[in-house]
Amino acid sequence: MKSTQALVLVFLALLFAWAGQIALGFFQVGKLEPILNEETNYTVPPVPSGLAQTGSRVFAAQGCLECHSLSVRGPTGSADIARGWGPRRTVPRDYLFREPAWIGSSRIGPDLSNIGIRLPDANELMMHIWNPRLKKASSTCPPHPWLFDLKVSGPIIEKEALPVPSKDWKQILPTYQAKALVAYLQSLHSDYSLPEAPLK
């Protein structure tokens, strides 16, 4: 009899945990919808391109979530906003078109939820992925040379080639994964107002 009661208690505990984590979250967030911006006739948050969605998988596969968060925390005037990581706090609606929604928890590096505005130049992002220490010698971010191809230069250097010296007449060209990662990083921005998180 006692084992039956224990089994019922375990079942109820699991049921309440499920209700708290899954069901409650669905009812709070699962019914959120994008907002139509009447000035631009586009929805906010914006829908990322297919290349950016592929880039989100590259972001996770390269372990970027181990060091970077994707969530500006706190109210207006918080440390995250004071650092310039975003113009407002991140809210659940910001993740509507991001599946899965990478949030991250570690902050060895800066938060990247607004990197598309802070660093909009695709070439700078590409250089950072190739070797972060070229621009900032103290960077703890590891280089990602496997996301690039070395090809012998022809008479004309390709437009996508990185502007760094290379050996043996070779040029450094981004792979599809590097381009997708940059597209994903450029899609990360929160420069739009939402009812629950207006821009000040």
Image (tube, helix red, strand yellow):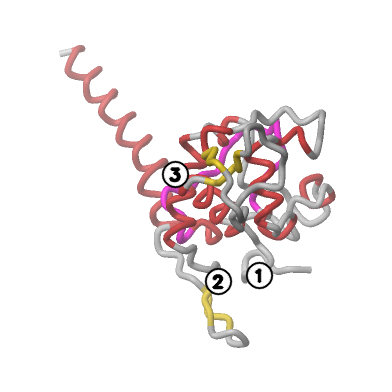
Q: Nearer the viewer, mark 2 or mark 3?
A: 3
Magenta stretch contains residue 149: no
Q: Quadrant of residue 103?
A: top right
Magenta segment: 96-113
- Whether residues under marks 3 and 1 lie with C-beta atoms below 8 angstroms apart, the answer is no
| Residue 54 placement (x, y as % from top left) | 43, 51
Please name whichever residue, 71 or 179, is drawn nearer the observer in this view of the structure.
179
Q: Which residue is mark 1?
A: 192
Q: Whole-percent x and y of residue 44?
A: 55, 71
Query: Looking at numbered disc 3 in the image, what kind of residue is underneath it?
Result: Arg
Q: Which mark is residue 57?
A: 3
Question: Whole-Å distance between the Cαs marked 2 and 3?
Answer: 22 Å
Badge 2 or badge 3: first in the primary sequence: 2
In the rendered image of this protein, does residue 158 appear above or below residue 132?
below
Residue sitting at x 71%, y 42%:
164
Percent coordinates x, y for residue 146 in the rendering: 52, 33
Q: CA distance from mark 2 to mark 1?
A: 7 Å
For this orientation, the residue located farthest to the top is 2
Amino acid type of the residue that numbered disc 2 sits on in the rendered structure: Val
**Hey, what amino acid is under mark 1?**
Tyr
Residue 102's place in the image compared with 15, above or below, is below
Residue linked to disc 2? 44
Q: Secondary structure at mark 3?
A: helix
User: Residue at point 42% right, 52% down?
Assistant: 99
User: Does residue 97 show up magenta in the picture?
Assistant: yes
Q: Earlier in the sequence, mark 2 or mark 1?
A: 2
Q: Is residue 67 left or right of residue 48?
A: right
Q: Compare residues 176 and 59 and report the one nearer the observer.
A: 176
Say how many tags the image has: 3
